[in-house]
Amino acid sequence: MRKLCIILLIIFFAPQTCLGAFFSKKPENAVDTSKGYVGTLPDLTKEHQPSETSVSTPIFDKTKEFNSANEIKPVPRDNPAFVNIILKQDKLSPYVADLQEFIEMLEQIYDSIESEENVQRFAARVYFLNKNAEYFRDKYSDKPESSYISYEKILEVSAHAKSVSELRTEAEKYKPYLAYTGTGAIYNINNINQQLDYLKTEVEDLINVLKETK
């Protein structure tokens, strides 16, 4: 009896097991998605070839060494343009440089006298010369340059120019009220022109002195 019960149980459960096995059986061509894609990938190397790395080449065949003795050109010391412009052999001393600035001022006063420029413009040019002469005097008064002829001449001509300028200004101011006799004769046009001629000669001589000073 016991064996019969066991046989019946086996027969009862056997169809369910077979049926489960039938439905649970995987097709031969089925893909197991739990392990990712397992198919065949196309061969991309047939359609796409790797690009070749381009190597840039220098324009020159070789790089020259900067410190190469064969590549350094000698200094053209025989070329006057190089010597005078590039090297500037002897730079002006501060004193000579100051003298050069007076040349233009003096030339303007010379031209003012030559062209008979009006009193106001002449006085303005002389005033500018005097101010520069005062600075020049204070700058070199306690230095060896104060004994130079150029130093003394600048102060002398500057003082003379100032006196002539004051004479012209006063004559312009007082001539309606003064007779050109006695004390008023100093403002006579002939006297003023004579003083201007003296000053013009002094200015010209001083310009030549300054241009020759090196």
Image (cartoon, grey):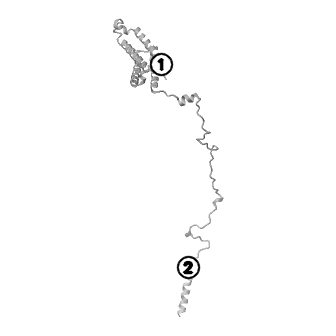
Q: Residue furthest bottom?
A: 1
Q: Which of marks 2 and 1 is nearer the N terminus?
A: 2
- Give residue 18's quadrant in the image: bottom right
Q: Give coordinates of residue 182: x percent, y percent.
A: 34, 6
- Name the one closer to the observer, 104 or 145: 145
Label 1 CA crowd tier, 10 Å (few <14, some 14–19, many 20+): some
Identify the residue under disc 2: 20
Q: Could you tell me which residue is drawn at 54 percent across and 31 percent down?
A: 87
- From the viewer's perspective, tell me whether residue 61 is left or right of residue 166: right
Label 2 CA crowd tier, 10 Å (few <14, some 14–19, many 20+): few
Q: Could you tell me which residue is drawn at 55 percent across and 87 percent down?
A: 10
- From the viewer's perspective, tell me whether residue 177 is left or right of residue 109: left
Task: Determine which of the numbered discs, if any, sits on residue 209 in the image.
Answer: 1
- Name the one closer to the observer, 156 or 56: 156
- Name the one closer to the observer, 186 or 142: 142
Marks 2 and 1, how far apart in space?
131 Å
